[in-house]
Image: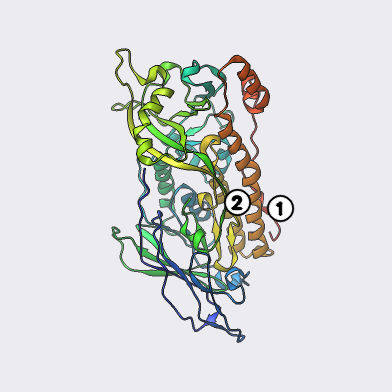
Amino acid sequence: MAATNIASSNLTLQLNGGSGIAQGNGTSYTDDNPYFSGISYQNGSSHNNGTSLNNGTSSNGISYTNSTSHKNATPYTDRRTTSNLPVVIAGGGCVGLFLALLLAQSNIPNEIIVVEPEHPDPNSTRAMAHQPPTYPILAKVEGLLPELIKAGNLSSGLCFRTSVKNGSKIIAEKTFDNSGEGMKGKGQLLLPQGKFQQVLMKKLAAFEDKVDIQLGVSVTGLRPSLTSIDVKTTPTPTSSRFGIEWIEAAFLIDATGAHSPIRKELGIKLEGETLAAQLVATDLYFDFHAHGFYDANFIIDPESYGLIGRINHATESKPPLWRVSYGVPIHETEEEIMKGVDEKLQAMLPNRGRDKSGAIAYKIARIAPYKAQQRLAQTLYHPSSHTCLIGDAAHLTNPYAGLGLASGMADAASLSKILIHILGNQALNEEKLLKAWSDARREKFQNVIDQPSRMAYQRVKTDVSTEEKITEFMSKDPLVAALKMGMPVQPPSLETNVEELEGW
């Protein structure tokens, strides 16, 4: 679906080197992110030591002052003066809310302020499956995992199979025993993002004295100083809230997602690539179970590749909702994608998606094309603005390994422990610790997220049209081969042991 361009008032980012800040005009632009747009770096100040700052221009055409590399300088931070300031989390998606919960349940005195321009959509089906490696991460919040499972359900099995035109033959499969105590051996958690957010919001309500969730509010200005950052917040046009507010914060956490304007305006680049095909996430009602499909089905085919996964169970009024994700050429327009949906679905669905009478048996609920990307921010920590990046603001990956939201949750878990340590005045060296955290999370993405995700994307595009090609495929893919032989597949941990980082 087309992104909606939302332009807001100019956002001012001021770099304070001392007193005498001179403000200028901002440069406005339109971005497909509702958080903010049109930021200007401004600094007409003289440092107390008499060093005069000269004007420069960022790659975005934004005016800022940088004769002393102030923008990227490492500040001296005295937590004795800032340790009681709030932590502002920009972005109230699952990752931002999870971080808020982790901080709220700690013993730090700091208020946690979540700024989110949109109200959660309970019907959102994005990020609908959550991998077992996230379970120990989610368990860091007491009682959260059982509530998430209650709100959703666990997958009963998965398989890799050929396309319908090649007989929909199962290549490898695994079923899950979801009975009994504990989470060992359990299937994926099937819970769409909208319901996931509802559970997190409900948990956060228990910390109302410590957490302030500001819905319908955008970040519209940043003013870093040497020891803190002032965050300007403005109600959105449709918000019931009133008044512009400046919040002095110990840290700003950017959880604003893939199109993060905070990341862009801080000059942090995303390195990597856009993959050679678009992906189309199509939600529809169809009885896949009646045709022998598992809860999760990876379709292996050079053209009709994709993922067919159950989103929820049937209700009294509706059949189960499923996600059919498939690829289209990168150059296809949205109009062309929409026109070709039925043709693609009928190539992927059993019996071409028809019932015994020949009538169309599926009903489309949602179509969402998007670019598949493998990208990583140059850094997850921007020292001079006291800003950390987590989730999609920090890195992007294709969905076929199911590690997108999972990696964001791991970011939040590790960062929460570091922030609690710093704000409790226990860190040996705050700057070294945050830099080491950034390096560790980048390395984790490169080795544990990016590589398996790329392999998963290439896997579904393999030619398995004959028995010989299936045998060759199995010999080259240890994960599918292990699944075929019933061997346990132990993915590496998504987490970072922060106590081993420099500066802890």
> In the rendered view, would you say 181 is above or below 4?
above
Kindly identify the amino acid type of the residue bearing the numbered disc 1. Answer: Glu
- Which of 89/58 is in front? 58
State the image coordinates of residue 494 (x, y, percent, origin top left).
Answer: 61, 43
Between 92 and 300, the one nearer to me in the picture: 300
Q: Could you say which disc has been placed on residue 414 in the image? A: 2
Nearer-the-camera pick, 372 or 435: 372
Is residue 217 visible in the rendered image? The answer is yes
Q: Residues within 10 Å of mark 2 (few under 14, many from 20)?
A: many
Which amino acid does the dot numbered 2 rest on?
Ser
Residue drawn at the location 30% of the way across and 26% of the way down: 316
Q: Outermost residue toward the front? A: 331
Mark 1: give few (<14), some (14-19) or many (20+) Cα within 10 Å: few
Which type of secondary structure does the marked residue at label 2 adopt? Answer: helix
Residue under the image location 60 percent in, 54 percent down = 417
Residue 41 percent location from the top left of the image: 49, 71
Identify the image quadrant of the N terminus.
Answer: top left
Say left or right for 474 vs 129.
right
Q: Is residue 223 left or right of residue 77?
A: left
How many marks the image carries: the answer is 2
Residue at which label 1 appears: 500
Percent from the top left, x then y, of residue 296? 49, 27
Q: Quadrant of residue 66?
A: bottom right
Between 234 and 471, the residue placed more toward the observer is: 471
Direction bottom: furthest residue: 50
Q: Residue at x 64, y 18 (%)?
A: 471
Q: Secondary structure at mark 1?
A: helix
Q: Position of residue 348 (x, y in %)?
A: 43, 24
Q: How is the image coloured?
A: rainbow
Q: Earlier in the sequence, mark 1 or mark 2?
A: 2
- Against 406, residue 291 (above or below) is above
Q: Quadrant of the C terminus?
A: bottom right
